[in-house]
Image (cartoon, grey):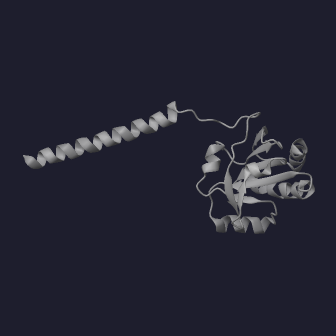
Amino acid sequence: MRNKKIRFILRLSLLLIMISAITYTLYQHFFTEKKQVQVGGQAPDFVLEDMEGNKVQLSDLKGKGVFLNFWGTWCKPCEQEMPYMESQYNHYKNLDVEILAVNVGESEVAIESFVERHGITFPVLKDKDQAVTEAYDITPIPTSFLIDKNGKVLKVITGSMSERDIANYMELIKS
């Protein structure tokens, strides 16, 4: 009799914990405000490490236009636009325009291999825990944000871009 009572209390406790967890998850998903990055709004600040282990903070780039690109090594459209971004980076880097390519949570080995294979020289940042990817509400990739010299989002681009598109976007954010 005593064992049955203990099992009942344990099962009831587990059931209450599960109900609490489900309720909390539903509340977070449906009733908390997710602030989506909007055109015309301020770009959320962040600090991420580059491939050399240096900290890069978005707000440190105020005064420059920023082409912020979220990408993955497995993403074919991302791979296609990287050479275009590299070409435009070489053209615009001395014109107060910066490219930041944020990798969405992949291993350092995969990122390094991709960067070497494509000869990328612009800053590649590692979003290991995908906190920045989540803060910017990134789906799908590639997604790029054009940020002006004051930190304001001018445009959000989802999907792949041609080299001409990237050149036009760089012109838009050039100081």
In the visual, does 63 lie left or right of 101?
right
Where does the image place residue 94, in percent across and percent down from the top left?
Answer: 92, 56
Q: Residue furthest left?
A: 1
156 and 32: which one is in front? 32
Q: Residue furthest top?
A: 31
Residue found 83% across the figure and 44% down from its top: 149
Q: Along the line of sight, which residue is nearer the eye, 16 or 87?
A: 16
Q: Residue at x 78, y 39 (%)?
A: 152
> Which quadrant of the figure contains the C terminus?
top right
- Name the residue located 75 percent from the left edge and 55 percent from the top edge: 101
Where, by quadrant of the figure, is residue 107 drawn? Answer: bottom right
Instruction: Let me know if residue 150 appears in the view.
Output: yes
Q: Quadrant of residue 43?
A: top right
- Figure label count: 0
- Image location (x, y in percent) of residue 13: 26, 43
In the image, residue 133 lies at what x, y percent? 64, 48
Q: Is residue 72 visible?
A: no
Left or right for 130, reference 159 = left
Question: Could you say where residue 100 lies in the image, as x and y percent from the top left?
Answer: 77, 54
Relative placement, left or right, of 29 versus 106 is left
In the rendered image of this protein, does residue 165 appear above or below residue 88? above
